Image (tube, grey):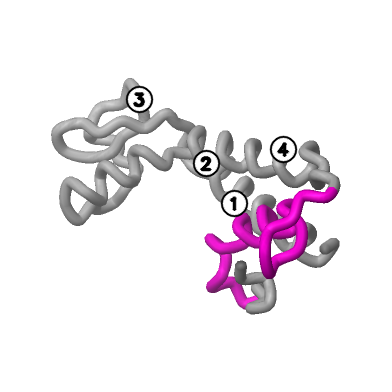
Amino acid sequence: MTDIVAFLRARLDEDQAVAQSATPGPWVRDALDVVPEGEHSGHTVAEECHGDADADHISRHDPAHVLADIASKRLIIDVVPPPPGAEVPDTGSAWDYILRLLTLPYATHPDYREEWRP
């Protein structure tokens, strides 16, 4: 299990570095673009949005949101101990299954292993 934990920690480190490099959030959507809260539409975070859905998505996933998501996943990995005796059919422990679920967003990463797929 240490390989899957190392993989998850490395991906979270990468996501955190990107989020910390971005213009800080929260981002909001104004009439013309996605902008940092309090900014005018002349200073855009996204060079170009392809419609309302893209703009809504970008504003909902600002760096503050991403960093909070990363922090919650780190707590799951680092703080929550594996439940003793908890079993999930065909995957081992519930802890193993949770770790496998956490890897799914990274399934296209070259270091992802198909045997981790739940």
Are there few (<14), some (14-19), or many (20+) residues within 10 Å of tag 2? some
* Magenta region, residue range: 85-111
Residue sitting at 33 percent across and 21 percent down? 38
Residue where numbered disc 1 is placed: 15
Judged by depth in the image, the label closer to the viewer, 3 or 1, is: 1
Quarter holding residue 62: top left
CA–CA distance in space, label 2 to label 1: 8 Å
Q: Earlier in the sequence, mark 3 or mark 4?
A: 3
Residue 52: image location, x then y, percent: 17, 46
| Secondary element type, mark 4 | helix
CA–CA distance in space, label 2 to label 3: 16 Å
Residue where numbered disc 2 is placed: 66
- Total of numbered circles in the picture? 4
Residue 107: image location, x then y, percent: 56, 70
Q: Earlier in the sequence, mark 2 or mark 3?
A: 3
Does the magenta run of residues contain 31?
Answer: no
CA–CA distance in space, label 4 to label 1: 16 Å
Judged by depth in the image, the label closer to the viewer, 2 or 3, is: 2
Q: Earlier in the sequence, mark 2 or mark 4?
A: 2
Residue where numbered disc 3 is placed: 37
CA–CA distance in space, label 2 to label 4: 14 Å
Q: Amino acid at mark 1?
A: Asp
Q: Amino acid at mark 2?
A: Val
Residue where numbered disc 4 is placed: 75
Dot label at residue 67 = none
Residue sitting at 82 percent across and 63 percent down? 1
In this rendering, position of residue 113 left or right of residue 108: right
Q: Amino acid at mark 4?
A: Leu
